Amino acid sequence: MTTAWGAPVLARFPEDPRDRLRAWDASDEYLLGHIDREEVSLDGTVVVVGDRWGALVTALAAYRPTQITDSWLGQEATRANLARAGVEPGTVPLLTTQDPPPGRIDVLLVRVPKSLALLEDQLLRLAPAVHAGTVVVGTGMVKEIHTSTLDLFERIIGPTRTSLAEKKARLILCTPDPALVRPTGPWPYSYRLPDGIGAVSGRTVVNHAGVFCADRLDIGTRFFLQHLPRPPSERPGLRVVDLGCGNGVVGTAVALADPRAEVLFVDESFQAVASAQATYQANGVPGHGEFRVGDGLTGVPDSSVDLVLNNPPFHSHQATSDATAWRMFTGARRALRPGGELWVVGNRHLGYHVKLRRLFGNSEVVASDPRFVVLRAVKGQNVVRSGGGS
């Protein structure tokens, strides 16, 4: 990526030579070009929010910007890109959306996230550190910036306008108003689950901003909850993984149904894992829960897990991709013990059964409706147990 501060070589994480998606886009270039053209002073505290793969902080590394991200993968990509650019570790502070932000911000650069709720939450957290002289610039592709996006900047930071489009990207230019009376954010948000979905019926779910379907139970998860495997009486204390756990409702359902189970909640979103832990604690689950932010089952020992439950995402930001699902399935096969099982829910048209057969040599339909399917794949020849169902 060519910038006024050099031409860093950037990559996504994990790096895959077959991946044709770049680690930056026109909105990153537009923002950096604007900072250069307008001669924005970067001598104070610079904060970059939502920098997807570290392109912005890598380009501006000489000014020691602070990155705030919800993505563990994005944070790891940033570390790798900074190292590739010769930046010493620790030069660029890397914070998560769960960390306290800096107390004073002189330049605030915002890469607009897909989630409007996450944008709202982050602007509310950062607004107290913004002062009248703070330069606030947002960026995103035209299709990512809506009237509701601009309204948030206007209500939380101050008067807001947009730039002309350039290469299908647009800037958000905001003038801070210290006298602005800001709204109170709703996050984290809790709600009661409906009846008829197994062990979590009527239970509480806690969602931090940005988690998928944060204000309601999505229909795919509802279908999955109705068809989770039954706890086996002959095998107490199974090691279970809620892979891509989101708000943790699936893993919490397992723990409530079988207090002997050890449940590992894993997601690459810091907001999601915080939500899963809050959901688990809100329901007083008697079992053992472990919460980890990371890339799927990386770091989980081989052949150490009995059951993996997974509702894989099929988008990477704006791009439709099965790369994440493939990594999840591959990681599950490695981590499962012989006879261990992977249960997957997904839209029928995604064809996950084909991938599972390639990896496991088998794939069974546990349940289906016109839109969703629950699939079961077993590692090895010895099936631990059969069954499932509502």
Image (cartoon, helix red, strand yellow):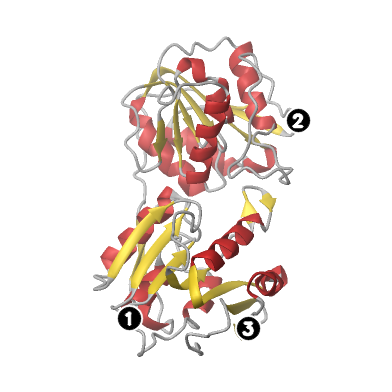
Q: Earlier in the sequence, mark 3 or mark 2?
A: 2
Residue 237 placement: quadrant: bottom left
> Residue 171 location, x and y as percent?
62, 28
Kind of residue indicated by mark 2 = Lys
State yes or no: discs 3 and 1 in contact (Cβ < 8 Å): no
Is 2 situated left or right of 85 in this image? Answer: right
Is 20 situated left or right of 12 in this image? Answer: right
The quarter in which the N terminus is drawn is top right
Q: Is residue 185 above or below residue 360?
A: above
Look at 68% across and 55% down and name the residue there.
321
- The Cα–Cα distance between marks 3 and 1, rounded to whole angstroms, is 24 Å
**Viewer-side label of 3, 2:** 3
- Say few, some or many: other residues with alpha carbon within 10 Å of mark 2 (under 14 / 14 to 19 / 20 or more): few
| Residue 24's disc number | none
Kind of residue indicated by mark 3 = Glu
| Residue 167's disc number | 2
> Residue 90 location, x and y as percent?
40, 25
- Say few, some or many: other residues with alpha carbon within 10 Å of mark 3 (under 14 / 14 to 19 / 20 or more): some
| Residue 364's disc number | 3
| Residue 258's disc number | 1
- Assign a secondary structure to mark 2: loop
Q: Earlier in the sequence, mark 2 or mark 1?
A: 2
Q: Earlier in the sequence, mark 3 or mark 1?
A: 1
Kind of residue indicated by mark 1 = Asp
**Viewer-side label of 2, 1:** 1
- The Cα–Cα distance between marks 3 and 2, rounded to whole angstroms, is 46 Å
Look at 65% across and 31% down and name the residue there.
27
- Say few, some or many: other residues with alpha carbon within 10 Å of mark 1 (under 14 / 14 to 19 / 20 or more): many
